[in-house]
Amino acid sequence: MNKKIVEIIPVLGLPEFKKNDDLLKILEDALNINKLNLVEGDVLIITQKIISKIEDMIVDLKDIDINKLLENESTQILRKRGETIISRTKHGFICANAGIDKSNIDVGYALLLPEDPDKTASTIRRKLKAQYGINVAIIISDTFGRAWRKGQTNVAIGCSGIEPLASYIGTTDSYGNDLKATEIAIIDELAGASELVMNKVDKVPIAIVRGYFYKFSNKGVSEILRSDGEDFFL
């Protein structure tokens, strides 16, 4: 039996990103330096931080109180313990401190989530298609905690060109049991796997997943967000 090999390739040597940087040009230069090429069917994982910096989602905390900023970026405050809150963001994500980040940025500033990660992912995918003539799926990732488990993992906050979920509902397992609820969050699994080569110390904000077969889709990350009625934790 032939087994498909899936590779996770870090894109090394990327600079510190800033407002209005040309991501595709910087990526092209880095690929050349690393002697890498994008190929048909690759999945490009891009961390939220560089997208937010390019899109100027940086806030000077001298201009706004952090509590007001949290309120502005949240649609609902779900829990609060000490200085940490769990809230629902404008995107529908449930995460710590509305996704506001004060790491890997100058002291006294905060970095907000991109306004529309799905739209950004779609724009990047279309530009890569125009430039290279190949289909590359895009996942924008961020690091989230998880209910009932310690530690954090990368998850998808935006995607384009890839089916977000693999559903096994209506199929049977190897024992003949009907599967009625099994859905695999493909984009989260790929985002999480990319973290293995993206550790924070080495400053690797982009990785390529190669060799993974996926279905093309125009669906966004909203496909994997539970509604209140489906959520057992709230």
Image (cartoon, rainbow, N blue to C red):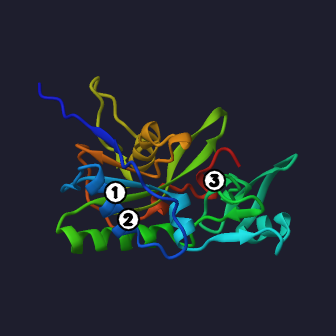
- Answer above or below: position of 77 versus 20: above
Q: Which mark is residue 30?
A: 1
Q: Is label 3 in a helix, a strand or a loop?
A: loop
Q: Residue at x 78, y 62 (%)?
A: 108
Q: Residue at x 32, y 68 (%)?
A: 125
**Pointer 1 with pointer 2, Cβ within 8 A:** yes
Q: Residue at x 65, y 54 (%)?
A: 94
The tag earlier along the polypeptide, 3 or 2, is 2
Q: Give the residue type that dot 3 points to.
A: Asn
- Compare residues 168 and 104 and report the one nearer the observer: 104
Q: Quadrant of the N terminus?
A: top left
Residue at numbered disc 3: 104
Q: Residue 138, percent across and down?
A: 36, 60
Q: Residue at x 47, y 41 (%)?
A: 195
Q: Residue 152, percent across and down?
A: 60, 39
Residue at numbered disc 2: 26
Q: Residue furthest front?
A: 33
Would residue 79 be found to the left or right of residue 147 on screen? right
**Pointer 3 with pointer 1, Cβ within 8 A:** no
Q: Which mark is residue 16?
A: none
